[in-house]
Amino acid sequence: MVKEKKTDVKVIRGGLLIDGTGAEPIDGARVLVEGSRIKAVGKDIPIPEGAQVINAVGKTVMPGLIDSHLHLWGIRTGEAIERVMRPYELRLIKSIFDAKALLSMGYTTVKDCGGLNAIFLKKAAAEGTLTGLPRIIASGYLLSQTYGHGDMHYFPTEYVDARSTKLHTNFKLLCDGVEQCIKATRFAMREGADFIKVCTTGGMGSERDNPSQVQFNLDEIRAIVRAAAQAGRFVTTHCEGSLAAAKQSILGGIKTIDHAFVVDDECIAMAKEQGTIFVSTLELVRGLSSGDQPEALEMAHKARPWAKVVIESYKQIHKSGAVLAAGSDCTGRPSFKFGTSAKELEDLVSLCGFTPMDAIVAATKHGAMACFMESQTGTVESGKLADIILIDGNPLVDIKVLQDPKRIRMVMLEGRIEIER
């Protein structure tokens, strides 16, 4: 018996359309999908004969959400000893389910900012070995200076650099000086990086440095950016609590400033002039500083001084009209599991002066910009990839509906219905 082929044409009709651009929602809209792309959007689009009709009456139609900063590490406990004692293969297996949890909550694109699992997950999805995963944009390896945020200070130096260590979970590349920075950038791209991730400040999760320390110098940053640009790649930075580092990163040509604990008017003006994007990770800082993530208490003392500062920074960025994309910095710790990224949107609304529409734009249009995919996804517009979610409820009334799995009724990725409840 020949199985009837499903139509490649779909029409979503009758819902409240929030298209991700920030425009007013359209009630009773129709979205015509042909193959992997959106063909037309509007109220009076004719329904082609034989099209699959998806009834969205009483529901909200939105672009798929985008998490612009996370790590699919496949961790189980979040404790440092896990990096040594738990086999890499187990972490890779767990990361498959973590990625599936993201898609099930409406996240159709995620940007992994350091870690090897994401590279393999992306390749497995591309060849069809794995299904049900979001689109993954991955840096793979991470560049750090010696005594930088990526230098695991509690290990002997011979265990730290991924090119020499026998520690399979390690994804850090130590580089000092222009020549080493160029070589590390090229190595990361050789191993499959979609973009380059570099650390230009210290951090909360490293032992001996702190978020206010400036790391790398301007010549090194420019060398990394140039080497990446030669291969059509952009650069993202871990940049937490140093204003000088943020300005230096922008001057050096880095395209996304992730975490961005500290900004001022000059920094924001520089970012707007250069087209630089800020990426929020407020939920992680809030959770660490409040003790809501007990398995990461060793980081709490570093997080507490920044909890109020970062809120004021995101308020200032938003008020200025600069671009801010929503990230989570989720790693899958027990108290901050994958599938909970939409908490960031609630924080932006409740703490940083964002309207629900602003927060949605941060997780759709601006997220696509932070992944350098704005021409392909992030909004429900003709010509874009059909990354669309159907919500039972209105996130403009209550942004928290995006955190309820029962409310995520459908997830479409490139025209394929991946999740249907």
Image (cartoon, rainbow, N blue to C red):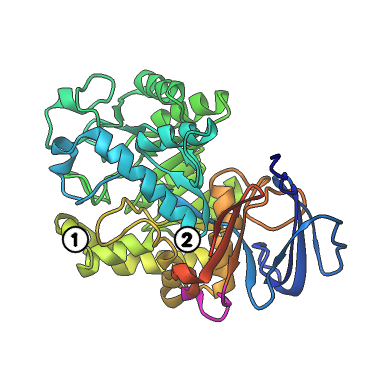
Judge from the rendering whether residue 195 lies leftward or rightward of residue 295; answer left or right.
right
Q: Nearer the viewer, residue 106 or 281?
A: 106
Judge from the rendering whether residue 150 lies leftward or rightward of residue 341; answer left or right.
left
Assign a secondary structure to mark 2. Answer: loop
CA–CA distance between discs 1 and 2?
Answer: 28 Å
Spot occupied by residue 104 in the image (x, y as percentages of width and height): 47, 57
Q: Residue at x 39, y 62 (%)?
A: 340
Neighbourhood count class around disc 1 (C-alpha, 10 Å): few under 14, some 14–19, many 20 upward: many
Spot occupied by residue 277 in the image (x, y as percentages of width and height): 53, 51
In the image, which disc is placed on residue 105? Answer: 2
Q: Is residue 308 visible?
A: yes
Kind of residue indicated by mark 1:
Ala
Residue located farthest toward the bottom when viewing the structure as drawn: 397
Main secondary-structure element of the magenta-colored stretch = loop
In the image, which disc is placed on residue 300? Answer: 1
Q: Residue at x 86, y 56 (%)?
A: 49
Q: Nearer the viewer, residue 120 or 244?
A: 120
Magenta region: 392-400
Judge from the rendering whether residue 224 lies leftward or rightward of residue 55; answer left or right.
left
